[in-house]
Image (spheres, rainbow, N blue to C red):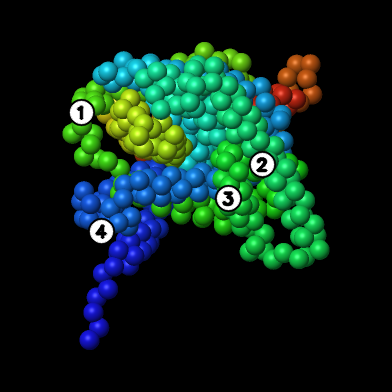
Amino acid sequence: MPALQLTNFNIACATFGGFICIFGLVSYLCKGRFYLSECLIALIAGLAVSPHAADFIRPLEYTAGSQSDLEAITLYFSRLVLAIQLVLAGVELPSRYVLTEWKPLSLLLGPGMTAMWLFTALVTWAMVPDISFLHALAVGACVTPTDPVLSSAIVKGKYADDNVPGDLQQLIVAESGANDGLGYPFLFLAVYLIQYTGMNGAGQDNPSVHKAIGLWFGETLGYTILLSVVYGAVVGYLAKVALRWAEKRRYVDRENFLVFAVTLALFIMGTCGMIGSDDVLACFVAGNAFTIDDWFRLETVDDSVQPAIDMLLNLSIFMWYGAICPWAKFAHNDIIPLYRLIVLGILVLLVRRIPIIFAMYKAIPQIRTPKHAAFVGFFGPVGVGAIFYLYLTRDYISQNITVDGKPREDVQRLSDTIELVIWFVVLCSVIVHGLAVPISKLCHKILRISRPSHDPLSSNNDSSFLSTLFNRKSTSLPFSQQPTMANTPAVSIVKPDVGGDEIRRLQRQQMNLPARPAPAAAAAGTRAGSSSPTSDGDEIELSEMRAMDRHENPTTWSESAATVACSSANGPQHITFGGARTSGIE
């Protein structure tokens, strides 16, 4: 008889597929209406099906109980997601963006990353008991890069389009793409110093500070960083030339054309991994070189294949993170108490990025005001990149800083510390940055209900914290199409010699008021010294209309005068309703 095949593979496929199907049914409701981050939803779903809850996903069973194999899977999965995301991020940027905007990017990637590294290290040093400053520097290096996966929630979608200026979106994408690959120098400067100076360099040949600095310059800056930049630029440009040649001769079909950037990311990740270079940085550089002439970007701007792949990767990686996160260790460990861990997470989000952005924003053209600086400083999320550097550090420690085949005592504690702190900071970032937008909108609606405004525009105002930052309305309509008064469209006068009766007739039509008998025609007069006829008066008080509208719509009419100011035939006409003034010439 047929029997149930409850294997881990079947359960995992059913769980991942079922979640993505259910999320797909309400995806617009979650992201377009409630502005919830898909990464946060996937993380919670991962926790719900993990061994800590429903126990559908059992990560340790997939690796036969090997924690090191589980960490290796997570490291490679994170590399895969970063590689694809960074190639796509480079493709999305305009032609030669990194070259034309090198000054603001240099500030964000140079002084900006250095300050974020040091501020995070200082907070870690202050909050984690019995940790050396070198170890704190290694912890800080893991959370220095901003995450391209979580940053996409800021620069993509309806809310971002309505509230974040386009040039600022591009700057955030470029920074998050470049600094993920530039985390290597910060991390390995601390790791090499720990390796060759900690415990007097036990287990190392010829330990000294000079050797650590020499390795950092030679291997990290020279081989890892510079080689990856050159390799990514060359491969990306050659891939662009080859694809354009094939497309011109109609050798490539549409499906393979659309996924070419994704396959390019896989190729670069594999080849850079084989030579031991920085595949993350190489992928971002390759994406920029691939669209150096904007051809591929413009050809694929209206296609949804790449965003769909992006969405699947986001949901999968954060659901996996929710399943493997060491939730129980946060409350039960001998490294840092939970209350200190909570304070550390809050302080990292507050001081890691905001101070340096405020210090530099006047030199960055895209960050025009202190409100823009607050936005850029606050939304510097920590996510996939931090997990990647976390397990990269643990892997390097377990293989290279050993005594008698085991990790050295000081780095074993560093390994445990870095796991706890990085995971907790990532969770804080996903939760805080994922809920910031919906909470700000909810607070705004509560304040608007509890404090009714007399402004007739307030009933149509859908702004929130972010839209207030950028002085825009949070709506899909452009500002020029927004109504100037609740339930009453603006009146535009085309003819410069429209009389007062005609104005009243037009206004009554737009307000859906019943028609009135036409008043007796007034004799047309002529101003002294002017050949143009005059209307019933240069200032026409619409008292009857205002009274009728106040009677029908008592909450939408301001007590301020509603007047129509008509100038002479040679000048523009203006209409003012409740303080909102519109030009009469279209």
Cα separation between marks 4 and 1: 29 Å
Of tags 4 and 3, the one toward the viewer is 3
x 46%, y 51%: residue? 313
Cα separation between marks 2 and 3: 12 Å
Q: Residue at the bottom extreme? A: 1
Going by the numbered disc 4, the residue's amino acid type is: Phe
x 60%, y 23%: residue? 217
Q: Earlier in the sequence, mark 4 or mark 3?
A: 4
Answer few, some or many: residues within 10 Å of disc 4's Cα (few below 14, many 20 plus, some between 14 and 19).
some
In this view, 307 is above or below 466 = below
Going by the numbered disc 3, the residue's amino acid type is: Gly
Which element is circle 1 on? loop
522 and 5: which one is in front? Answer: 5
Q: Earlier in the sequence, mark 2 or mark 4?
A: 4
Q: Which residue is disc 1 drawn over?
A: 334
Q: Quadrant of the C terminus?
A: top right
Q: Are marks 2 and 1 in contact (CB under 8 Å)?
A: no
Q: Which residue is disc 4 drawn over?
A: 56
Which element is circle 3 on? helix
Cα separation between marks 1 and 3: 39 Å
Q: Which residue is disc 3 drawn over?
A: 270
Q: Which residue is disc 2 drawn over?
A: 232
